[in-house]
Amino acid sequence: MWTLASESTAGDAAPVAARYFAASGGARARSATLSLGDAPGTLLLSLTDDATTRDIPVRELDASERFVAATRTVQLAGGDMLEIDDGRALSRLLTAAGNPDAIVTRWQHSKRAALTALIITIVLAIAGYRWGLPVAADFLAHHTSNDLAALIDRAALAQLDHQTDLTKSRLDTATQDRLRQKFSELTLSLPPAQPVSLVFRRMGNVANAFALPGGTIIVLDGLVNMAPNDDAVLGVLAHELGHVEHRHGLRTLFRSAAVSALAAWYFGDFSSLATVTATLTQLNYSREFEAEADSAALLQMQRHHIDPRQLAELFRRIRDQGGIAAPPKDEATSPEERKEKPGKRWSIPDFLSTHPDIDRRIERFERAGRVSAGKV
Amino acid sequence: MIDSPLTSGTPNGSPSEMSVAATNASSAQASHPAQRFQFTGSGGEYFRIWIVNVLLTIVTLGIYSAWAKVRRLRYFYNNTRLAGSSFDFRGSPIAILKGRVIAFLLLLLIQVPFLGAVVLIFYFALLPWFIYRSMRFHLANTTYRNLRFAFMGTAGGIYRAILFPIAIILISVVMSFIVHFASRGIGSVMLAISIFAFYGIGPYIQYRIRAYVTAGSRMGTAQFGLHVGPGRYYLAYVVAVGYWIAYVAVAFAILATVFGLDLSSLQGTMDAIKEGSIPHRVAMIILLAVFYIGMLAVVPLVQGMLQNTVWSGTSLERKAFQSDLRVANYVVTWLGVTILTVITIGLYRPFAVVQLARLRLEALSWQGSPDDLIAVQRAGSDAAAGAEITDMMDVDFGF
């Protein structure tokens, strides 16, 4: 692709001036000359002040890399050293003696090769981000032990409980028990290796549910209150189970961790790495993952005779009401409070967020519902 | 983390990293001029080396980074000249690779919930030891005129340098709590003093580490000496903090009165930016960017002032170094190259590193004469470096 200019031909290997520093004694420089030896593969070192010469097999010396203006050093076998200012001439001499510059060295000296390296690096960076990273992250996610995933969940839940306005659920025990019961029926058909658990929390009236990487599914009270019936809640749970089954949490986590690590290496700032796990709770699934979770949810609902149209109805309500249910009287918040956190209170739930096309999803569940109803 | 002095001119490098490796040369019999350091590298050349390093590091999934580091160090060392000779770095990439593998594993462990916290504590407990190992590795592998540098400091020395000041703070905090039970007033005052001391002890620790590094460094039989006290460190930080306070106060006042921006409230700032036309918003954002970049100036300010006072207070073979870095020029250059590095998503970085290294290195000179150098014998540091060189491991990471 590029040509590496060869530095020399054997013919122009002229002698090179050097400064000689002996292995022992002081740091006195002695003037010397390095030239091509008579025997192939050897160099001849002549010291100017006492007219002594020395034959040196080229493979016994260790020359520093050639740079444009830098002084080069050559280590000789016995601990002696040469300093040579004319780096190009030394390269010519070494090449003639059978020891040319390393490929990387020649590469670094060629403008065209450096430009090529720049382009390849940019292409690799983009391609790696687009394709390589997901593949590597997915591989890691599928090989993460469930114990480790469970640890991550515990840390994430603890963080959510402490650092967000997540509070204890106010759903009555009967409702919780009933949903738990139905949830465990739902999980029976999952591969048994994956542990899952259901946790109830509350964040004002926010209607939302999300899955943590290790299989913990958090349902907010607002969602249960807004759902037309249990089937709609189960539909959301089936969707979240789809995320768990396909390891979307871990896959997303590893992807973002890898991006942080690469950025840290490139920019030489490692402080950001300590915060990787802090972003755990702000995971946003890609559209592709959401579609996959929807498919998994549909399959589950079919298997358990849950009408997908109930889920479609829940989505419609969330869409129409901007993310929260009409607050029951005792829970109405003061206008000031509402003003403080407009984003949070009115945000679109995670399981709808990456979808500008809520309507299309509603349509998908509607159609699936009509089809299965037709079959019966 | 502890690069040798020759490469510390990066935007991230702090003055404390200017280890004593950069040293050397001629003698101060008033009769001949001081030996000035010269830097012969260029941004364009280093860019080519850097981009090849980046590409090979990516292709080898990071393994090449150890070789890349040796190439980078050699580039800066070989291009640094003093009294007609240049420096060299002979470290083995394998030793660096070992250190990086360990660093990588530690980074992974720290991400694990709960266990990570324990690992992090161990990491901080071992950090001084890592610094010590790193000093040994770097100096033992640095040469000048076939003279090896060496680091003779002990592991205990660095713990004493760091732990002694920290212990005083801890004892003072504990005492204040005890006193607090007896007398709330006195206890609270003591606690306030302790907290203030906690932040105030930083420059002293930096000074202790520098003294430890300088006292332990050798080049052959030649010894280094540090002749400044901690006061110089405090002076630099007092100036920097003074600049920062004055800058922020003036900037706040101008932004508030002229542009109506109240920076004390994030929400207010955001609202102010959202209002108005597109050009108005862009102008506001640029204004804010300039404001934050102005705050960054404390970094090169401290670096520049410390380089001058600390190097001017350092000697080799009882001949002084002199540093006459023009601090204002350094600050402006640092800000300029940092902005360019950010704008180019890092592609300007090699140029930035070379520019700053040149400014810092060429400000340095040594009052010794060539004869002083010739008198230096190899024996001193070879014995210290000894057999360890081959199996030594470079531990160079930090957060």
Image (tube, coloured by chain):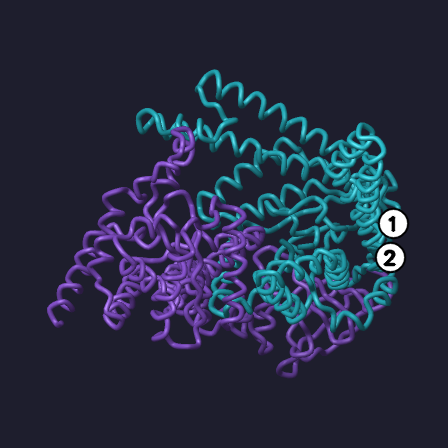
Chain colours: A purple, B cyan
Tag shown at residue A327: none
Tag shown at residue B376: 2
Q: Tell me: A103 left or right of B37.
A: left
The tag earlier along the polypeptide, 2 or 1, is 1
Quarter of the view holding residue A344: top left
Comparing labels 2 and 1, the label whose residue is closer to the camera? 1
Mark 1 surroundings: few (<14), some (14-19) or many (≥20) residues within 10 A: many
Task: Give residue A179's position: percent from left, percent from top.
Answer: 36, 61
Q: Residue furthest bottom?
A: A39
Amino acid tagged 1 = Glu
Q: Tell me: A229 left or right of B36.
A: left
Amino acid tagged 2 = Val
Chain that bears disc 2: B
Q: Quadrant of the C terminus of chain A?
A: bottom left
Task: Give residue A237's position: percent from left, percent from top.
Answer: 34, 61
Task: Give residue B19's position: percent from left, percent from top.
Answer: 74, 50
Q: Nearer the viewer, residue A209 or A373?
A: A373
Q: Nearer the viewer, residue B131 or B270?
A: B270
- Per the image, the residue denoted by label 1 is B317
Question: Is residue B195 something that shows in the picture?
Answer: yes
Mark 2 surroundings: few (<14), some (14-19) or many (≥20) residues within 10 A: many
Q: Residue furthest left?
A: A374
Q: Tell me: B166 left or right of B287.
A: right
